[in-house]
């Protein structure tokens, strides 16, 4: 027996193809919008220090539009594999998508238009999507018969999610009612918990499974992952508290912990990859390794800023390294493997077998995306550092081309899916 | 025989009357898939083996197809999942 007949039973463990894949395609579309918003605000982006406008919209299109979409899709499909328990309700998982897409669109539209009521409406929809996602994920964790390290990462990420979404809602309302004493402190704490607490923990937790899977390597040992988990959680919590209270010493301790956490994470991942069976790593690892370098650079710059180093436009550069250099590089790298991988589970080749995922992924758009992404991150970073707006514009336009190529790739992959009769769609795992 | 995996976890490998067996139950993903692949990509690989897993390895099948191995479910129950693997003649 080969995959042709066995996949019939295997599909019972998969969500319907479109449930995770629509999150990933939406992430690719929001990726385009993020670069477009940055290109439109090219004159002011280098001086961004918070506050509504196109740059804040670009930032949230990247974090909520790209990173959250990817995190929702990946978690809904991969968490049941780690927990060995079903996700619960495919309908509710789909509903979280239909809340998140308009939520992000309205919220970022309100930011771009500097409209507090629109931002509040978008934040409410986005908050509902996150609440539903958190409830689905928490219920899945509660049913898990195992306690793999990944599960603890997701639990800690959910705690960070609750706090950063609450802070985000307070910031949106503060734009209208002005009740926060330390708006910028709360905004910095919100960003820290979202980037390092939520996305950082999910990236580290799922990355410890996905990256060895892509490279056919042994996963990192549980003990090492527990140390990484403790460091990221402690760094995020301490830094967020210090930033919210505008207590420099506490924030600095958080920065030191964050630097150690980032170094530990990269060390543990690279040590795992050293055991790989695949001699030549795929192109996605160029993006993954660039993301590791950007993460280290971002936390070191953050540490310098917390220590009082006079770095011109340092906060904007820190945000750029963190969001574009680390998050977007990692996510687009991983998505270029997950998209064809999950699609392959729902299609058959000419011989009736499950095809290798690589055969579904067109190479050209991925090469264009990678080249554009690296050039864009570098140019915009230089534009911010040197205060040259033309470099920001050039980088944003190149990034826009790369994001367009990524949409091309995503659509080419999902085009392999053929409509099936309702009764043959994937079921609850 | 036990095979040391990565930085501590182990898979159990033994020879029985019906051939070679590998038990990867209890290992965190993707270690089960990787350890079976290590065995079939060894310098002197077996022609057949039985793998004992916690669950059906749905993401593993395309990798086996690509390496010219066929597979069949040998057992499925509360104790886990057994997969009989055989190298295709042409592989």
Image (cartoon, rainbow, N blue to C red):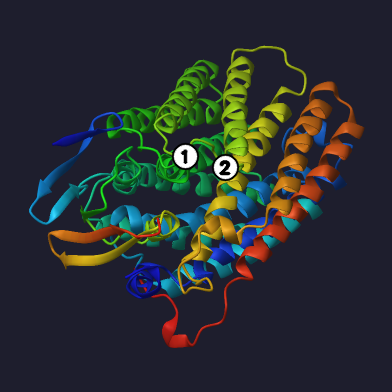
Label 1 element class: loop
Residue A285 in picture, x, y percent from top left: 57, 38
Q: Which-is-in-front pick, marks 2 and 1?
A: 1
Could you say which is closer to the camera, residue A277 or residue A186? A277
**Chain name for mark 2:** A
Residue A266 in picture, x, y percent from top left: 48, 27
Q: CA distance from mark 2 to mark 1?
A: 9 Å
Instruction: For residue A118, say whether it is visible.
Output: no
Quadrant housing the C terminus of chain A: bottom left
Q: Which mark is residue A278?
A: 1
User: Given the current orientation, which residue lies at the most extreme right position?
Assistant: A390
The answer as to whether the residues below labels 2 and 1 share one chain is yes
Q: Mark 2 and mark 1 in contact? Answer it, CB < 8 Å.
A: yes
The residue labelled by disc 2 is A282
Residue at 44 percent across and 60 percent down: it is A76
Local crowd at mark 1 within 10 Å, few (<14), some, or many (≥20)? Answer: few
Quadrant housing the N terminus of chain A: bottom left
């Amino acid at each position: 027996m080969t995959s042709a007949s066995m996949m019939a039973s295997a599909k019972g463990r998969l969500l319907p193809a479109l449930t995770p894949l629509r999150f990933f395609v939406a992430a690719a579309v929001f990726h385009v919008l993020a670069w477009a918003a940055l290109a439109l605000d090219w004159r002011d982006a280098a001086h961004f220090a918070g506050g509504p406008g196109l740059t804040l919209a670009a930032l949230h299109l990247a974090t909520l539009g790209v990173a959250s979409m990817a995190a929702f899709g990946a978690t809904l499909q991969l968490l049941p594999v780690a927990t060995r328990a079903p996700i619960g309700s495919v309908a509710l998982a789909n509903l979280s998508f239909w809340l998140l897409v308009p939520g992000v669109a309205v919220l970022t539209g309100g930011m771009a238009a500097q409209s507090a009521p629109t931002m509040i409406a978008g934040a409410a929809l986005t908050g509902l999507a996150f609440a539903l996602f958190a409830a689905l994920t928490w219920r899945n964790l509660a049913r898990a018969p195992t306690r793999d390290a990944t599960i603890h990462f997701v639990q800690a990420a959910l705690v960070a999610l609750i706090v950063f979404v609450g802070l985000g809602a307070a910031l949106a309302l503060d734009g209208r009612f002005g009740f926060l004493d330390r708006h910028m402190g709360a905004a910095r704490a919100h960003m820290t918990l979202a980037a390092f607490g939520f996305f950082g923990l999910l990236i580290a937790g799922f990355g410890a499974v996905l990256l060895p899977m892509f490279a056919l390597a042994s996963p990192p040992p549980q003990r090492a992952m527990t140390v990484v988990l403790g460091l990221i959680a402690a760094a995020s919590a301490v830094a967020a508290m210090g930033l919210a209270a505008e207590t420099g010493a506490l924030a600095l301790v958080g920065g030191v912990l964050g630097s150690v956490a980032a170094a530990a994470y990269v060390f543990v991942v690279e040590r795992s990859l050293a055991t790989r069976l695949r001699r030549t790593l795929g192109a996605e690892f160029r993006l993954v390794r660039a993301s590791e370098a950007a993460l280290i650079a971002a936390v070191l710059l953050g540490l310098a800023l917390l220590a009082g180093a006079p770095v011109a436009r340092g906060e904007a550069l820190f945000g750029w390294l963190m969001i574009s250099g680390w998050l977007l590089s990692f996510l687009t790298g991983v998505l270029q493997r997950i998209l064809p991988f999950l699609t392959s589970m729902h299609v058959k080749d000419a011989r009736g077998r499950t095809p290798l995922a690589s055969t579904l992924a067109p190479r050209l758009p991925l090469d264009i995306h990678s080249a554009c992404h690296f050039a864009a991150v570098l140019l915009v970073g230089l534009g911010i550092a040197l205060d040259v707006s033309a470099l920001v514009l050039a980088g944003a336009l190149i990034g826009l081309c790369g994001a367009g190529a990524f949409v091309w790739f995503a659509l080419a992959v999902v085009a392999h899916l053929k409509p099936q009769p309702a009764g043959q769609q994937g079921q609850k795992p | 025989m036990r095979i040391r995996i990565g930085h501590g976890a182990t898979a159990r490998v033994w020879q029985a009357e019906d051939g070679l067996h590998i038990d990867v139950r209890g290992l965190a993903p993707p270690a089960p898939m990787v350890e079976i692949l290590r065995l079939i990509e060894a310098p002197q690989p077996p022609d057949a083996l039985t793998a004992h897993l916690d669950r059906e390895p749905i993401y593993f099948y395309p990798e086996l197809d690509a390496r010219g191995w066929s597979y069949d479910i040998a057992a499925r129950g509360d104790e886990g999942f057994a997969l009989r693997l055989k190298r295709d003649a042409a592989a």
